[in-house]
Amino acid sequence: MDISHRKVKTAFRVIDAEGRPVSGKEIKVQQTRHSFLFGCGAFDFIPYVKEGDAEHKEIVESWQKIFNYGTLPFYWGRYEPEEGKPDRDSLMKTAEFMKSQGITVKGHPLCWHTACADWLMKYDNETIMKKQLERIDREVSGFKGVIDMWDVINEVVIMPIFDKYDNAITRICKDKGRVGLIKAVFEEAHKMNSDAVLLINDFNTSVSYEILIDGCLEAGVPISAIGIQSHQHQGYWGADKVYEVLERYEHFGLPIHFTENTLISGDIMPAYIEDLNDWQVPEWPTTPEGEERQAREIEEMYRILFSHPLVQAITTWDYRDGAWLGAPSGYIRKDNSPKPAYDMLKDLTHNEWWTDTTIVTDENGFAETDSFKGDYTVTVDGIETKIVADKASETVIRV
């Protein structure tokens, strides 16, 4: 697989105080962060920042050895269970801590029919819409500079026909139509932070999602990236489907984020289950055979996605087993021990797809390396220089 687009030529010229080239000088080039967003659900950061207990400290520290990008939950009904009393402080403190660690943070989601605020139901549709936009104003502007990436709206393909229970967002989606609601919430988010990365996100990868995106773009909706959920509790998609999904969404020319990726290391959920939430079992253990299978499948999927030039981010949904649906879908077990998938992905992201090398200047004081795009510490004679390698460039170092 060709991953040359993930690299960039990084050149250095070493000169002395008089501006003369210095030959034979060693330059240590050490990557500190990927430009590519290797992400994971970061829900465990919240209790760690709030309580600082040893168990969550262990989880957070192992998480950071692989990932540079985390998703935090802004489910309206949980974030603001009582109108006017959002849990802003804990989310802000968590996001600020993550940013201080060099982690890019995404908020998920601003508009969704599931986990919606029940108190919205007492209002008419016009008022619900007004409050939805006010919620977007509050979050996007209030977290600007700390969170500048949002899943603006989630699972719109089924939103107006969702019939498991009545909710305020399905009501306004029926009223305004899918494209009408999407346009309204995206324009509001863009108005609050014009530099933010704004995603549409869905688990439905059928032609219905393609048609919806096409309609949104025709209507001028400012979509920054296409979010594709890939919860695979019922078995790995396989390489053919991964390629097929990429081929169907690449024609939009927008960045693609795999926003919620899940692969199981235990028994596979039966195929007859239509809604993953309906699968309720007393225990769902991980198994040695399942863990080996999980690692193989994750590796194949990551290699395919990393090789595609439009894919900018991959987010694992569950870091620890049992986080969602009780599934053995994490990179670590319930006792926090790493699974084979953890070791595999760490090796990919911080060894195979990582630059840590020493180069030596020629007679013109020049040296060059082919580096993975990202942040670097460059050291010459014990003096460190920080650079960002995202396009071909030359850095002059004076010794």
Image (cartoon, rainbow, N blue to C red):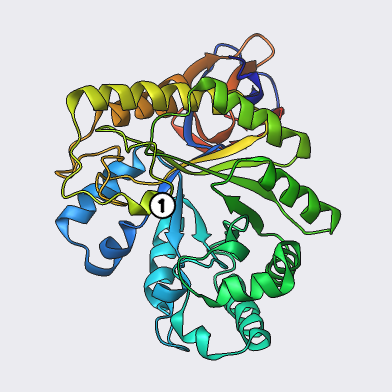
Query: Is residue 207 rendered to the left or right of residue 384?
Result: right
Quadrant in which the C terminus is drawn? top right
Extreme residue toward the top, this view: 363
Question: Mark 1 = which residue?
Answer: 101
Pick the residue in front: 144 or 280: 280
Residue 17: x, y in percent?
64, 30
User: Could you say whether the residue bearing mark 1 is in a helix, strand or loop?
Assistant: loop
Q: Would residue 241 be visible to someone looking at this image?
A: yes
Q: Answer few, some or many: residues within 10 Å of disc 1's Cα (few below 14, many 20 plus, some between 14 and 19).
A: few
Residue 127: x, y in percent?
64, 88
Instruction: Tell me where residue 85 sits by quadrant.
Output: bottom left
Q: Would residue 354 be visible to someone looking at this image?
A: no
Residue 207 in the image: above or below residue 29: below
Residue 51: x, y in percent?
22, 67
Residue at 66 percent across and 70 percent down: it is 173
Residue 93: x, y in percent?
39, 69
Pick the residue in front: 132 or 177: 177
Instruction: Tell me where residue 49 sits by quadrant.
Output: bottom left
Query: Is residue 334 rendered to the left or right of residue 39?
Result: left
Query: Is residue 183 rendered to the left or right of residue 146?
Result: right
Name the residue type under label 1: Gln
